[in-house]
Amino acid sequence: MKKSTLAGLAVIVASLDPASVSAQSSEMKDMNTFERPIAMADNVWIEELTMPEVRDLLADGWRTALILTGGIEENGPYLTTGKHNHVLRVMGESIAREFGQTLVAPIVTIEPGTPERASSPGGIRYSQETYRAVLRDYAVSLKAQGFDQIFMMGDSGGNLRGMQEVADALRTEWAGEGVVIAHIPEYYNYQDVLAYQRDELGIDEDPRLEGLHDDYYITTIIMNDDPEFVRLAQRIDAGMASINGISILPIDEALEHGKKLIEFRTEATIAAMRAAIDEQSSR
């Protein structure tokens, strides 16, 4: 910006009547009481809803919230570093809608580890202390707004211990307040997913075959978020549209397999959520 323009702006700001500025500020609408002027969006992601939409959903009984943790890591030459976060986009959507009256907090996209040793390109890490603090702050914030069923789920193995410890600590701290807080380890069920893929979809995969941090079941789940995140077009061009000897073509078939895997994981997760509610409610 030119100096003359900056000087002109300074003159305008200096000439403003402070009382006038204060009056304008006082006219800001309070979104806690402001009547929502438009129809409610069909969305379960808190960050994609307006504040009045979240407010009204809470008032309508949407008191369940999901805290999902993913990560940024090396996933071979085809999957993005945010593999787990892309999986959580489709899984969070599916679980929230199937469970009902449930909203999803912004995904915790960074996993715990040792930042000083995060030498793998793109491999950003939280310290364990930061990770646990983030989880606690997420849960406390949700409780403060009125959510009374809060579930934590991790899509990366290194995330689980911290989630369990934070959930256990908060459950003790909130005892008697009528709030369910639980880590759902049953969400992280990739061995069961592998068996389901073999027994129900007829696809017997050896994840070690190509030596990549990649699998058919992960790839097809992510394709239901966006095929670009598995570099589908580039792989087709290069004649590499397969993983562990299993083709990810035709696309429609791979997408359908991914949907069935999403449904399988959703059912297992919701069963565990209901069990956690029953267990905590009986205390």
Image (cartoon, rainbow, N blue to C red):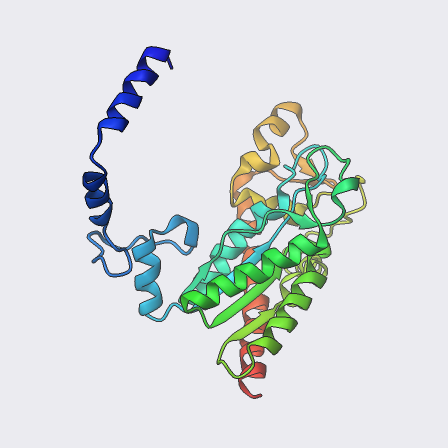
Q: Position of residue 228 (x, y in %)?
A: 55, 34
Q: Which of the two residues, 103 or 91, is positioned nearer the viewer here?
A: 103
Q: Residue at x 33, y 61 (%)?
A: 55
Q: Quadrant of the C terminus?
A: bottom right
Q: Residue furthest bottom?
A: 282
| 257 lies above or below 273 | above
In this view, the residue in front, 236 or 179, is 179
Dividing the picture into quadrants, the one containing residue 14 is top left
In percent of width and height, residue 48 lies at: 39, 48
Q: Is residue 202 visible?
A: no
Q: Describe residue 175's horizontal placement relative to residue 131 as left or right.
A: left
Total labels: the figure holds: 0
Quadrant for the N terminus in the image? top left
Q: Residue at x 41, y 65 (%)?
A: 145
Say which residue appears at 22% left-offset and 49% top-offset. Answer: 26
Can you give x and y, in whole percent of width and height, for residue 208 in the image? 81, 46
Q: Is residue 268 left or right of residue 20?
A: right
Vertical side of 62 occupied by 133: above or below: above
Please name whichever residue, 252 or 49, is drawn nearer the observer in this view of the structure: 49
Q: Quadrant of residue 83?
A: top right
**In the image, what residue occupies the spot 18% across and 39% down?**
20
Asked if 229 appears above or below 57 in the picture, the reply is above
Residue closest to the eye, 86 or 198: 86
- Residue 88 can be seen in this image: yes
Q: Quarter-wise, where is residue 182 in the image?
A: bottom right
Q: Position of residue 249 (x, y in %)?
A: 60, 38
Locate residue 196 relative to residue 93 in the image: left or right. Answer: right
